[in-house]
Amino acid sequence: MGANIIHADLDAFYASVEQLLNPSLRGRPIAVGGGVVLAASYEAKAFGVHGGMPGRQARQLCPDLQFVSGHFDEYQRLGDAAIDVLVDFTPAVERISIDEAFADVSGSVHLFGAPEDMAKTIRRRVRTELGLPISLGVARTKHLAKIASQVAKPDGLVVVDPPYEETFLRDLPVALIWGVGAVTQERLADAGIATIGQLAAARPQSMERLLGRTAGGKLAALARNRDPRPVVTQRRVRSVGAQSALGKKPAVTSVIRPTLRHLADRVASRMRAKSRAGKTVTVRVRFADLRAVTRSITLPAPVSATGILAEVAEELVHTALADHPTESNISLLAIAVSQLDDDTALQLELPLRLQDEKRCPGTRKGAARWLADRAMDAIRDRFGKEAIGYGSVALGDRRAIPDAFRELAEREL
């Protein structure tokens, strides 16, 4: 097979949109956000500023940094428009985020020429029609196309022909591999592995011992560019989730409960908007040293009520903390719901004085919580999300990261 997969990634997307909307910001170090950096321009990144960094630290690194508020509707509009350019060349487009997608152009070469020519045209059109920089990688596999687009940044194009794949990958850092985070990179470094070539030369069994059977085997295969995944145009959403980075907060109920209520509100409202509910609830707790644990439970019936989801998640979090009694601080909480069901019709249950009646969707109390959520959904649809909310969330600290920004990242695309 030839290099027929294109990975397109809009460069410093949120900051680039702000510079597009306000030309006076072009060429200047800017950051979207305030208390927390949501995104940074390349000019700001040159000083070490990056997304997720506290605003005070960012200003220390770059005294001339200018913060701007986000234009979330414009992010969605321009992100959609860039994807539409890809669709003009092939219907085989797999969107993986607001500003990133894969395209399989193997069936389009007889119409538009070589994949490299299509990539050049896509890049030119996004620049001229939308005014945004975009980097593209062209390769035989999705994994390699994504790495090529990262190497191409900013605003570039890299094509990796099959005979040169090994040479191209050999000296690149392992951090470019999809799924290699800071912790994995550190473990690999401790084993003397810093480049993709070194990872490819390592024995798969040793990687499985170092990183675990699943992760070790997967990374060993990717280092050898063994990636059979096709471009999937329509993916059925298997789970819905949200997370909140906390910095470093004490693992106490006054922190955990409002955070989980906020996350449950985001997750459950998205499920209800799609007329879906889920049986399996999973929480993730990350400690101050960045180690993370997960706990999950499968409920007897699918749920989409915010209150039920929040209470189940809180019990799971406290279970995780009880299993790690020496951990007194947490840096992130996350909720995910899986085993989604399209049928949201409630299965009514007999009034048998169930021990936890309000958590059973088919009981009178359980149904009442769901109906209250639906009433709140209707108010938000008409007057906006800020029109109504849960007191434990609304009366708490204001979120450093706006929900509109979070929803762009979490949106089911």
Image (cartoon, rainbow, N blue to C red):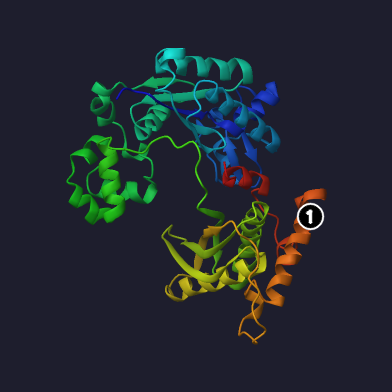
Question: As drawn, is 355 to the left or to the right of 212?
Answer: right
Amino acid of disc 1: Ala
Give the residue at x 55% y 27%.
43
Give the image location of residue 366, x and y in percent.
Answer: 68, 73
Q: Number of labelled discs?
A: 1
Give the image location of residue 293, x and y in percent.
Answer: 43, 64
| 362 relative to 402, above or below | below
Can I make out residue 88 in this image? Answer: yes
| 242 relative to 356, above or below | above
Viewer-nearest residue: 342 or 31:
342
Q: Quadrant of residue 142?
A: top left
Give the residue at x 73% y 63%.
373
Q: Quadrant of residue 271?
A: bottom right
| 138 relative to 216, above or below | above
Give the image location of residue 307, x and y in percent.
Answer: 66, 68
Q: Which residue is mark 1?
A: 378
Viewer-nearest residue: 10 or 49:
10
Give the image location of residue 400, x and y in percent.
Answer: 65, 50
Viewer-nearest residue: 385 or 35:
385
* Location of the N terminus (image quadrant): top left
* Location of the C terminus (image quadrant): top right
Viewer-nearest residue: 250 or 125:
125
Can I make out residue 333 in this image? Answer: no
Question: As drawn, is 297 to the left or to the right of 355?
Answer: left
| 412 relative to 6, above or below | below
User: Quick one: label 1, few (<14), some, or many (20+) residues within 10 Å?
Assistant: few
